[in-house]
C-alpha cells in the first residue's frame, strides 16, 4: 500500500506492506508496483480544484504497464457517467454542481485515463463514503435507473468489494456501483 500517511493504514495483514509515498511521484509509484499481481487505486482528494486523482492514476497506470501487471481496480465515485442517474435529487442538482464540481471533474478525467488503458480494469463507483466496519452486505452492479440506492457505504465495504474483483471478471472493463 502506497500512502502519504502510513499511520493512516490501521489494518494489518501478512500480505500488506505499507510504503510511504505520493501517487504524484512517478518514481515512487514505479518502485512500489513490481512483484504484485494487481494494483488497487483509491486516491483520496478534497473537494477543491485538483488533478490528484487523474495524475496519480496516470502514474499508477504507467507503473503497472511497465511492471507487466495486468489488473487495475480503481475507486471513483457514484455520479460519474451513467451512475449520475443513481444520485438523489439534492446531491445531483445542488451538492455536486455547487460543492463537488471540481472533485467530480477530477474523477471524470481519472476514469477516462483508466478506460483508455489496455489493462484489465474495473472502476468501482461508491456513493458517499462513511467510516464503519466491513459488513459484507451491500448492493453492486445495479442499473443507473435504480432509485433505491442508499447513498452511502463504509470504506471497509468498498475495500471488500474491490478485493473481491481480483477473483472474478464479472465487472471486467465495467464501472459497477456499490452501495448499502
Image: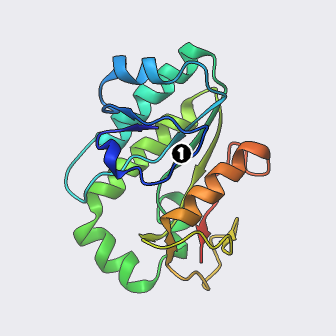
State the image quarter where residue 38 is shown. top right
Q: Quadrant of the C terminus?
A: bottom right
Q: Is residue 27 above or below residue 125?
A: above
Mark 1: give few (<14), some (14-19) or many (20+) Cα within 10 Å: many
Query: Closer to the camera, 58 or 98?
Result: 58
Q: Tell me what residue is drawn at x 52 percent, y 48 percent.
A: 12
Say left or right for 160 vs 172.
left
Q: Residue 17: percent from the left, percent from the top?
A: 50, 34
Q: Is residue 23 above or below residue 85?
A: above
Q: Residue 3: percent from the left, percent from the top?
A: 36, 40
Q: Tell me what residue is drawn at x 35 percent, y 16 percent.
A: 27
Q: Tell me what residue is drawn at x 32 percent, y 47 percent.
A: 7
**Residue wearing tag 1:** 74
Query: Closer to the camera, 82 or 155?
Result: 155
Say left or right for 119 vs 170.
left
Q: Residue 20: percent from the left, percent from the top?
A: 33, 33
Color theme of the render? rainbow
Q: Tell me what residue is drawn at x 71 percent, y 43 percent.
A: 166
Say left or right for 92 vs 102.
right
State the image quarter where residue 4 is shown. top left
Q: How many marks?
A: 1
Helix, strand or loop under label 1: strand
Q: Residue 132: percent from the left, percent from the top?
A: 48, 73
Amino acid at each position: 500500500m502506497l500512502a502519504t500517511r502510513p499511520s493512516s493504514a490501521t489494518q494489518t495483514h501478512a500480505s500488506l506492506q505499507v510504503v510511504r509515498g505520493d501517487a504524484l511521484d512517478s518514481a515512487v509509484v514505479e518502485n512500489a508496483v513490481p512483484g504484485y499481481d494487481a494494483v488497487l487505486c483509491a486516491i483520496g482528494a478534497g473537494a477543491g480544484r485538483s488533478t490528484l486523482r487523474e495524475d496519480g492514476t496516470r502514474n499508477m497506470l504507467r507503473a503497472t504497464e511497465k511492471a507487466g501487471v495486468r489488473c487495475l481496480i480503481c475507486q471513483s465515485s457514484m455520479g460519474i457517467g451513467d451512475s449520475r442517474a443513481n444520485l438523489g435529487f439534492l446531491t445531483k442538482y445542488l451538492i455536486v454542481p455547487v460543492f463537488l464540481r471540481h472533485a467530480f471533474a477530477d474523477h471524470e478525467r481519472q476514469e477516462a485515463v483508466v478506460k483508455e488503458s489496455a489493462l484489465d480494469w474495473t472502476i468501482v463507483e461508491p456513493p458517499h463514503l462513511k467510516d464503519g466496519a466491513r459488513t459484507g452486505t451491500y448492493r453492486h452492479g445495479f442499473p443507473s435507473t435504480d432509485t433505491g440506492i442508499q447513498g452511502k457505504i463504509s470504506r471497509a465495504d468498498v475495500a471488500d468489494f474491490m478485493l473481491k474483483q481480483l477473483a472474478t471478471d464479472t465487472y471486467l472493463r465495467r464501472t459497477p456501483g456499490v452501495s448499502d
